[in-house]
């Protein structure tokens, strides 16, 4: 049955997975260099360190953190030091207990998933690290989700980990990753361990950078000759609007799938156009899921304000937001917070907002949703917000 399909364009499709870590990252050299400067003392002086990686979806935060941790572990081995790391996706494990269980499972895969308090699990982890004489890098990806739901107590506990041990050895370093600034989510005790100077920023990729990233993944994932330079450039152009490497990689994979479905051994521009149409829908879906409750409520309010018009104003959207909050039994955030939500949604590419021009009195912003029917968006958001309450 499968022989009739012919050869696939893919030679290593895993290289197009979002979990794949290339042996060398392109266009994140400065961020890797900054992390090396921050964490070098962990190996050379046995101290602990913290860092905060900040940037929009698809800017390489997670893959950079993983690549750096792999390189740091290798460097430590050459220095006869034991360093390991564990990455926790806080959207999937959004409670202190779930995060701690994932960390302990890294060393004890059969550890029971209930029956232990947070304090007991931390003590078990301490004994494990002391026994192994190991320094652990804890990477909390999408940390804002955990912090919003459970507070910053776990960050404080990790930062004071050494003080409670037998010999005061530094056993844990912490790396937080988020799409947005999380310093306002840390209490003063936790905030004292995170310096703003330890923030590593990730900007959107340029079209040229996206082209290089796409070419690198194509060389690893596809057979020689499966895609030409013009098609790689077209993928970069198609994803440049978002500056999102994940989007470019997704288009590359979907293009290859369309080529395989047509039993052709090359990816054509038409495959890429079709792949982008599919990818836009799925990336919008993933962005919606990643929003916290009030961002969803603001976007729902804007969608409802646009039911019968092309544009809405900030004032109209804020009134609709307060009604949506009442509907879902949420307390509306203050006006300044609402403005921040608008900026976040604009940065995520989910709305388009710009200052009003002539004909509209007062200073306000004109808002629209350019890429999705508002009725479809409204239905999806109502479902997502309702699911959060279950």
Image (cartoon, rainbow, N blue to C red):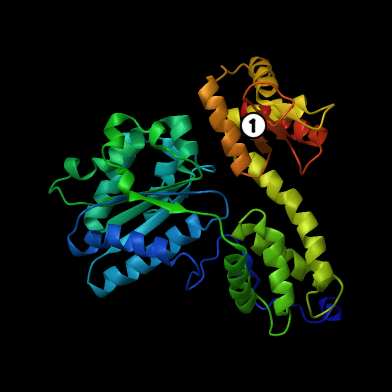
Picture quadrant where residue 227 is located: bottom right
Q: Quadrant of the N terminus?
A: bottom right
Q: Residue at x 35, y 60 (%)?
A: 34
Q: Position of residue 120 (x, y in %)?
A: 31, 37
Picture quadrant where residue 205 is located: bottom right
User: How many numbered markers are drawn?
Assistant: 1
**Nearest to the observer: residue 205 or residue 223:** 205
Residue 267, placed above or below residue 370? below
Q: Position of residue 376 (x, y in %)?
A: 81, 36
Residue 43, placed above or below residue 127? below
Q: Position of residue 29 (x, y in %)?
A: 43, 67
Whether residue 387 can be seen here: no
**Nearest to the observer: residue 104 or residue 33:** 33
**Nearest to the observer: residue 359 or residue 44:** 359
Q: Quadrant of the C terminus?
A: top right
Residue found at the very far front of the displayed protein: 358
Whether residue 270 can be seen here: yes
Q: Position of residue 66 (x, y in %)?
A: 44, 61
Q: Is residue 206 left or right of residue 62?
A: right
Check disc 1 and report its element: helix, strand or loop. Answer: helix
**Nearest to the observer: residue 367 or residue 291:** 367
Residue found at the very far bottom of the displayed protein: 224
Residue 257, placed above or below residue 86? below
Q: Residue at x 24, y 43 (%)?
A: 161
Pointer 1 residue:
296
Q: Is residue 195 left or right of residue 281?
A: left
Q: Is residue 133 left or right of residue 241?
A: left
Q: Residues within 10 Å of mark 1 (few under 14, many from 20)?
A: many
Q: Residue at x 78, y 66 (%)?
A: 272
């Amino acid at each position: 049955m499968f022989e009739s399909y012919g050869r696939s364009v893919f030679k290593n499709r895993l290289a197009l997975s979002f979990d794949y870590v290339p042996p060398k990252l392109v266009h994140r050299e400065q961020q890797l260099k900054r992390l090396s400067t921050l964490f070098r003392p962990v190996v050379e002086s046995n101290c602990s360190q913290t860092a905060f990686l900040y940037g929009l979806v698809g800017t390489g935060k997670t893959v950079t953190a993983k690549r750096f941790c792999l390189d740091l572990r290798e460097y430590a081995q050459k220095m006869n030091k034991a360093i390991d790391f564990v990455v926790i996706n806080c959207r999937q494990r959004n409670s202190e207990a779930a995060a701690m269980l994932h960390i302990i499972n890294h060393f004890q895969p059969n550890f029971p998933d209930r029956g232990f308090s947070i304090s007991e699990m931390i003590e078990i982890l301490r004994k494990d690290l002391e026994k192994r004489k190991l320094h652990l890098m804890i990477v909390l990806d999408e940390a804002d989700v955990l912090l919003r739901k459970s507070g910053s107590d776990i960050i404080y506990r990790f930062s004071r980990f050494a003080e409670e041990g037998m010999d005061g050895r530094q056993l844990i370093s912490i790396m937080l990753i988020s799409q947005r600034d999380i310093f306002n989510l840390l209490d003063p005790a936790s905030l004292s361990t995170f310096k703003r100077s330890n923030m590593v920023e990730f900007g959107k990729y340029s079209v040229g950078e996206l082209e290089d990233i796409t070419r690198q993944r194509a060389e690893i994932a596809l057979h020689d000759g499966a895609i030409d330079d013009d098609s790689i450039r077209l993928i970069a152009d198609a994803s440049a609007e978002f500056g999102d490497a994940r989007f470019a990689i997704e288009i590359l994979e979907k293009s290859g799938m369309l080529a395989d479905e047509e039993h052709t051994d090359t990816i054509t521009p038409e495959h890429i156009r079709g792949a982008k149409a599919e990818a836009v829908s799925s990336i919008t879906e993933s962005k919606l899921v990643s929003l916290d409750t009030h961002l969803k409520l603001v976007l729902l309010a804007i969608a409802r304000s646009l039911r019968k018009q092309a544009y809405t104003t900030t004032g109209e959207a804020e009134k609709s937001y307060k009604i949506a909050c009442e509907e879902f039994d949420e307390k509306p955030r203050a006006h300044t917070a609402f403005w921040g939500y608008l900026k976040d949604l604009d940065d995520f590419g989910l709305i388009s907002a710009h200052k009003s021009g002539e004909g509209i009195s007062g200073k306000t912003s004109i808002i629209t949703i350019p890429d999705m029917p508002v009725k479809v968006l409204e239905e999806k958001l109502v479902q997502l917000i309702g699911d959060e309450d279950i």
